[in-house]
Amino acid sequence: MIDRRLFTHFDWFTFSLTAALTAIGLASVYSATHAQMPAIYKKEVYWIIIGLAGLAAAVTINYLLLERLAYALWGGAVILLVSVLFIGKTTAGARRWLNLGLFSLQPSELAKLALIIALAKYFTSRPVPSKGLALKDLALPAVFLLVPFLLVVKQPDLGTAIILWLIFWTMTLMVRVRTRTLVGIVAVFMALTPIAWKMLKGYQKARLMSFLDPAKDPLGTGYHVMQSKIAIGSGGIFGKGFTNGTQGNLMFLPEHHTDFIFAVYAEEWGLAGSMVLLSLFLILILNGFNAANDAKDRFGFLVAFGMTTMLFWHVAINLGMVSGMLPVVGVPLPFISYGGSFLVTAMIAAGLIINIKMRGFMF
Amino acid sequence: MSEYYPDKGPVEFKRRATVAVVIAWAAFSLLAARLWHLQAKEGGFYTDLSQSNSIRLIKAVAPRGIIFDRNGVKVADNRPSYDLFIIPEDVLNWDMTRAMLKGMAGLGADEIDEKIDNAKGRPPFQMIRLKEDLPWDEAVKIESYKYEIPGLILDVTPKRAYIYGPAFAHLIGHLGEINEKELKGLKKKGAGYSLGDMIGKYGLEKAREKELRGADGGKKIEVDARGRKIKLIKGAPPYPGLEIRLTVDLKTQLSAYAAMKDMAGAAVAIEPSTGRILAMVSSPAFDPNALSTGISSADWIKLVENPLDILNNRAIQGLYPPASTFKPIHAAAALEEKVITPATEIFSGPSLWFAKREYRDWKEGGHGIIKVHKAIVESSDTFFYQVGLKLGVEGLSIYAKNFGLGAKTGIELPNEKNGLVPSSAWKLKATGTRWYEGETISLAVGQGFMLATPLQLANAYAAIANGGTLYLPQTVEDVRAPDGAVLERFSPKALSRLKISAKNLEVVKEALTGVTHEEGGTALFLKASNLKIAGKTGTAQVTKLRERVKNIEKTAYKYRDHAWFAGYAPYDDPKIAVVVIVEHGGFGASAAAPVANAIFKAYLGEAAPNAGQTPPSQPSTIQAAAQKQTETYDTLSPRGEGWVRGIND
């Protein structure tokens, strides 16, 4: 099964990028938590090992196997999401985790991968008219999106829901949607949103918002972002130095080791560090798009593109939110934020990109 | 290219993938620009914020400089006080915090809001004082709950303690929280005050604010998001204020205060050889301890609107006609101008007719033919009417000014008044009418337009006593560092010489001795004290109608007259000059002289045992102790009917 050429053609470049980002992530989690929660970064090490195993598996597998199993994987992810509703672990008002004894799994993360693979399979197997997809062509993809989407919203996990939504539209638009169909869909959404919003009363809106995102800061929307901006801004050009950040260490910043980890990093490493991290992400993403372009088939293209897209949206939304440009939604930063399931997901995504990139040349 | 074939490469995606690359570049450029903005452009701003976020400055208030009397007895000290502060930014649950404050410190929501509202201009995370001087049980309660209510801080700060309470009220003054106007003025000078600071508001506390204040220290504490202390970053200990040694003699001051108790007026005692103030009392007095610890606005209004004008320091701000206490000055002027000689005999009858008006003498039968000596001893009015007319208004006013009347003495206490020495030019300018000679008659006996503060008069008498030198009245002898090292010593400062020859001054002094030692003297009873007191009584009319005719009414308006005594002792080597005025006290001899006698006795007499030299040990018993002092001195200096031989002027 394991091809020898895997070793000779191994994509060290993408792997190095992944390794560098993961190392930065571990260091940041250590800095953010070593004082108050020393158990966290040790756990992160275990997750990195699991993630590396996932990466290795994703690299070695023949991705054509994924194409064959695409719908089954999607079905499995949905089953896990449903089971979370019943036997899931509740933390901070959200039921997102499956307790697997040694560790907890967040099936919504796997759902992102499953959605990408299912869409890739569907768009590969279905002939796409040259004018683009018509409404009827979008029916099944819509099911692929909406089933996990609604299950995730129910948890609730607004961040993952948004990511699923963005993955769906990015991939669908890449495959091409008929202009008429697209205009129609956009028009319907634009017409529906204000009506639906108006029908709600003020407290219902507030309730809806808090239902969608209960982890949102209870002290007021501004607090999170303000603290985050203070942390980032006070880092200045060269930062306060590793583990010397005050905002994160003194717990001014909630979620400082998960969604807001970048603020801790930027406070300690300054603008210089921010630019290094930003560059690594940009190279990773451009490299991902390159891998997709070089893929030898449509499925490979769509999987590599979908995985890259997922990483891109995570980075863009997370950094946009942490730097105060976007509203606060729970979207972690790939490889950097603490959180096992998403780390493994991101590693698998990186592994698949490596896989496709390698096989683009190999065969 | 219409259909997709699985084996075909994804060429149709290439162009669209380029769009994705462009979008990625755009998104990352935007993020980079945003981070540059936050970290490079606004980095300093956020650095400041991050520091105020996690660093709390807790002010360590400097203990104010201790004030001693001339013998080194403490009269103003500091005591610890538990103050409750709030940092609104650290409060997590306002409802709970309010409920706790209500329950534990009796603070209503309105009160809290008002305090926070008043501190609007403060930098973020600066503490706001909610309540001063918490009782022990409240302090304990709050301290034990402090982890449940982030944002509340209990701190021990030094608080001013005026050991003798109201006895030093007008002289030392009191403190108060700095107001916005003061803050603005001081900020310009860069004195480093901030809202909530205590500042001298009155008396020496105000005049010597700079020395007494000291330098506040501070603790820089790093806290976490819940306001819990993580570590002390830097602590600068407060530097206590400089110590001040007054020129005032505690025993004399206390006896003056006690003797003036229940009366309105003032008493000033000066050391003639130096101009140093030995005692200064204005009555009624306020309690500086109460005023310095957050007086309620209702109590404040009550104090301000008190008809007796408690906050007025009558010793330097009270303006009274000097009345007969002016006669010695008049006499000196007349002798110097050679209007009279010591031997000049003038018939001084029961009244003087001038311009068809009768100007009466206080003594119904008159004094007969007398010389200047007897005129002062018996306080003859008709004698001085006649001399005054010869001397004229200008002569009188020049000499009055020469004795320091009509101008500030220059004492360092705030808001000293000028007084008034009239002249014909002044009258024309002030009222538009010319000077009438009848007014000279009033002026001749210190009535009419003439107004003087008790301090001015005391200084004039001190000059008479010391042979003719007017000194700057001083209240502070030296300023010392907290370790006792003398930093600045204030040596006596002569301001001017009286334009009176030694010979003529001697005539006046002998007459003043006569007042208290010769038959017919208006304060003869003071002879009994054996303190060699010399002096002059006076009765100042305060009727608002300046009826020149009625200046010397004997019995009418009795209740309206102010009683004066001005003198010094011992007459052969003056150690203390005293001026006392008792408002509405009636006659000088009966109301003011006994007070002066008590002061002389306290300073010159044998030290009464335990005469206030031991300050009370417990601050809480200050009031009681002061009360006790008062009673002690009451018995020491009786003012009885038997003293007075029905004499007045």
Image (cartoon, helix red, strand yellow):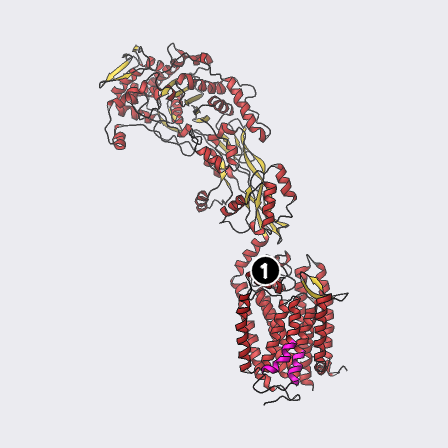
Q: Quadrant of residue A38?
A: bottom right
Q: Is residue A120 in the magenta section?
A: yes
Secondary structure of the residue carrying numbered label 1: helix
Circle 1 packing at 10 Å, graded few (<14), some (14-19), many (20+), is: many
Magenta region includes residue B544 = no
Q: Is residue A137 above or below residue B275?
A: below
Quadrant of the snapshot with the C terminus of chain B? top left
Q: Chain of mark 1?
A: A
Q: Residue furthest left?
A: B355
Front-most of A305 and A75?
Answer: A75
What residue range appears in magenta? Answer: A117-144
Q: Residue at x 69, y 83 (%)?
A: A359
Please provide percent x and percent y for residue B610.
Answer: 56, 21
Q: Is residue B172 left or right of residue A36?
A: left
Residue that lies at the very extreme toward the front in this rendered image: A199
Query: Which residue in the protein does label 1 denote?
Result: A224
Residue B608 rendering spot, x and y as whole percentages: 54, 18
Image quarter for residue B274? top left
Please tell me which residue is depicted at 57% across the width and 67% down the height of the picture.
A320
Q: How many numbered markers are drawn?
A: 1
Toward the viewer: B585 or A210?
A: A210
From the viewer's side, name the closer residue of B133 and B324.
B133
Is residue B417 shown above or below B463? below
Instruction: Label the magenta part by its dominant secondary structure.
Output: helix
Q: A288 and B624: which one is in front?
A: B624
Question: Residue A73 appears in which quarter of the rendering?
Answer: bottom right
Residue A36, image x, y percentages:
68, 56
Q: Amino acid at mark 1?
A: His
Residue A349 in view, yes or no: no
What percent of the width, then of the height, locates residue B127? 55, 47
